[in-house]
Image: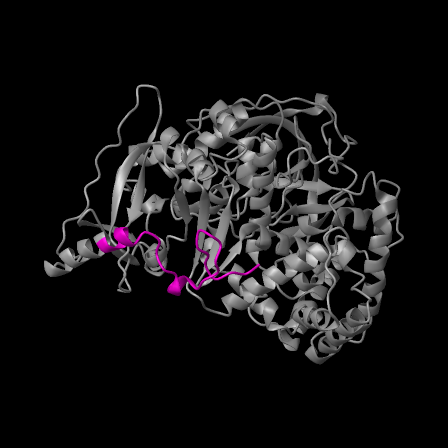
Amino acid sequence: MIIFGVTNDGERLSVADAKPPGHKTYCAAEKQFENFKSQELTTTEMDSYQYQDLPTDEQGDIYIRLVQFYPTEKETGIPPPCSITEVPLSKCPKYEAVSYFWGSPLDQGQIICDGKTITVPVNLYGFLSRMRLKAANRKFWIDSVCINQSNEKEKSSQVAEMRNIYANASRTLVWLGAEADQSTLALQFAARCSETLSDLNPSSAKRRSLWYRTRTYSEFSIFSNSWFAFFKLLDRAWFLRAWIVQEVALSTNTKILCGPTIISWSELYRALYYIINYQIWIFEFYGSPQIEVLMALQSSQFEISQGRKRIYWQVLSRHRKALASNARDNVFAFYGLSSHESFKEHSIAPNYSESVRSVYMNVAISTLRMATNLDFLSIARLEKKSGDDLNLPSWVPDWSHSDNYCQSFLLFEAVEGDMSIKFPYSATKDSKCSPIIHEALGQLEVSGYVVDRLARVSSHWELQDTTGYQSLRKQAMVLQRNQAYVHEWEATIDLRSDPNSKYPTGETLEEASWQTFVAGQAADNKDAIRPLYYKFRQRQRYLLWIHKRGLDNHIWIWMLVVILGHILRFVGIPNPEMGFRTLTSQMINRRIAKTEKGYIGLIPRLAEEDDYVVLLKGGKFQIVLRLKGEGVWEFIGDSYMHGMTRGEFWDEGKCSTFRLI
């Protein structure tokens, strides 16, 4: 349900009109504010607030700071004055945590704290200005205020305790920013999606009028402004912050505020769940990288609620699309999740005095030194050069890179313990490895042998820009580009010319192809997935008519196809491709390839023709390497080669040493 602010007794109010509880507190605050005013001091003339070192506790308890604001009864348009207290975390009074987007360090404001000034991000300044009349007698934990940002030692110790800080908060307030781009409509639409999901459950369904059902259907139309508003809301910078994962996942009560509107986190998640499961067609025309970020967040929140444990680098991989202004936080921001114990086991803790390169190298080295398999090498290498001239070896993930993200074959993104996921991958059977790290040289020594070489490589499947209102023409352009990818894939592996030709495994080329498109996950479930592929193929045969007539470059023909699709959906006939396409997410930002021996597979975006396909001891997949010199190789990434993933080529006696640089 959408509300516009609530008092302690549940009365619905506009945030701007809310009256503060505790009149005496406000009178005292007003006097304090008038004192500041009477002294004719501006914030630029005040001294800066000087943080004192946090106390230490003999019992090992950690201290945190809490901030309390003293709003005045007069609306001044600026944040109210405040004071800071230091309290042991285990004995904290009730407090609320605030989550927000920091923004550029050049965009800042100043608040008055104990008669002095503290510089805060401009987004927080906006939040405090709006919440001024509701902040009386409430204590907050706000990272930019409650942590001395100039003290690296304090930052490290406080970041290590953030999991407890957010877990102990009475609630977390998420501030998305001021109302803009139909944000109120977006949150109303999210609430409607949540209600619609409830209506699908007979036990919670409500009787809806014809008018309600008609309005709901119109809202879900491709041309509805609700879709534009919803995805525009998800494009706000807050949703891509690395820190939001820990801030929301560890909180037991999270509210989202955007302008004057409030919605619960659970409603937003239920809306996403409904769209992904019941309105999936929309992703052909609208998309947002934040969808994956939020679903990954929900997976981590679920694991925490269930007490499940994860290996820390798998959690880092899951949240790789999240962004951080400090590159160290691409690791440290996830310290408090289900991977907390794994971080400790590998002796990795927040330390802001370390260089970024040192942090990333430590992650790789500590993991591989304890490894008996090469699953770590299934973390995709996204760029050839490491960020900010870190000069990382090719086998060390650069966690600061999030562009061109691709899902792992081993589905690190999935929830731990999901019994529905079975991996049919064992390229080197049950072999074990003991990688040797030459730290001074930046080299990783492994054992294996070359099995094939890439002969033909397609371009990578790049997600298109689907931001903004999706006009009929924009929808047609998306469909046109997707079909161009399909034609290129088929040409690369000769699928269209001879689909019934014999593949090296004895299957037909078409049978091997569709299993490659789903990265081999149909190996033990072919009968269930094959019908989905046939529906995909049937529609492709109709669309092939456009290609054969040479009409690919005529946008009007694609506009007609889009219109026909909407008509069919209106009468209850969904796009027959979608069932199969939902299984091909691992193709995104990867290439299709054919090898010299006639095998086909999914390979890294960075792979090129003449790269080598190698089996490495302890690996579940084939690895693509590039020869850089005698016995020295560049790591490109793992690959799925159909017919090589179940140990068909494995012979440990052929192994020799490979040095990855």
Q: Nearer the viewer, residue 65 or 12?
A: 12
Is 573 situated left or right of 469 in this image?
Answer: right
Q: Residue furthest top?
A: 58
Q: Residue at x 66, y 58 (%)?
A: 195
Colouring mode (rainbow / by chain / secondary structure / one colour) = one colour
Q: Residue furthest bottom?
A: 556
Q: Residue at x 51, y 70 (%)?
A: 182
Where, quadrant-wise, is the N terminus in this rendering?
bottom right
**Which x, y percent locates residue 282?**
67, 64
Q: Is residue 405 visible?
A: no
Is 68 situated left or right of 253 in this image?
Answer: left
- Above or below residue 226? Residue 512 is above
Q: Main secondary structure of the magenta part?
A: loop
Q: Residue at x 81, y 40 (%)?
A: 523
Q: Residue at x 27, y 54 (%)?
A: 26
Q: Nearer the viewer, residue 542 or 38?
A: 38
Q: Is residue 420 visible?
A: yes
Tally the numbered discs: 0
Inspect the magenta stretch and tell me whether residue 19 lies in it. Answer: yes
- Over which residues does the magenta segment extend? 1-27
Is 332 situated left or right of 484 in this image?
Answer: left
**Which x, y percent locates residue 138?**
35, 47
Inspect the magenta stretch and tell me whether residue 652 lies in it. Answer: no
Is 70 situated left or right of 176 in this image?
Answer: left
**Which x, y percent locates residue 246?**
48, 41
- Above or below residue 222? Residue 449 is above
Q: Nearer the viewer, residue 300 or 210?
A: 210
**Which x, y percent locates residue 243?**
45, 45
